[in-house]
Amino acid sequence: MIRRREENRSKPAKTMNPDGGLEGDLRAETLKWQKRAEDLFSSASGDEHFLENISAYLSDSNYFLEKGDLIRAFEAVVWAWAWMEIGLEIKCLKKKG
């Protein structure tokens, strides 16, 4: 049986933030991951190159969020998180304490 395209479409996802819609969801997720990334960053030590790049991505994320560029703000915090995860995995970084 061949289905028509309309039948194959999934239902739109419900938003996590009913008052803010997709924009509100993206802002909330960005803020949540910024907090997590900043907490992890503040407890990290190690390779200065890694730490400088992470700091730059966190700074970029804040800048883009202030400018209302939510996609770039989220993208930057994801990159910061990725650098930290990679640094911890390959032992260029370690958690303090």
Image (tube, rainbow, N blue to C red):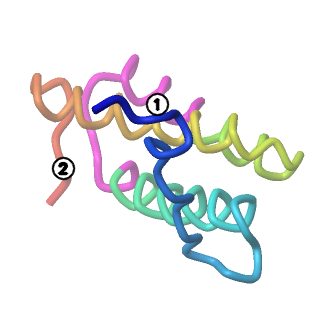
Residue that mark 1 sits on: 79
* Structural crowding at the residue carrying mark 1, measured as other residues with C-alpha within 10 Å and reported as few (<14), some (14–19) or many (≥20): some
Res. 67 mark: none
- The answer to which of marks 1 and 2 sits earlier in the sequence is 1
Q: Main secondary structure of the magenta part?
A: helix
Indicate yes or no whether the magenta region holds residue 51: yes
Q: Position of residue 63 (x, y in %)?
A: 78, 42
Instruction: Name the residue type under label 2.
Output: Lys
- Residue depicted at 30% across the width and 55% down the height: 43
Say which of 1 and 93 sits in front.
1
Identify whether 52 is placed above or below 73: above
The part of the chain drawn in magenta is 41-57
Residue that mark 2 sits on: 95
Say which of 86 and 92 sits in front.
86
Instruction: Name the residue type under label 1.
Output: Trp
- Residue depicted at 46% across the width and 38% down the height: 78
- The residue lying furthest to the front in this view is 1
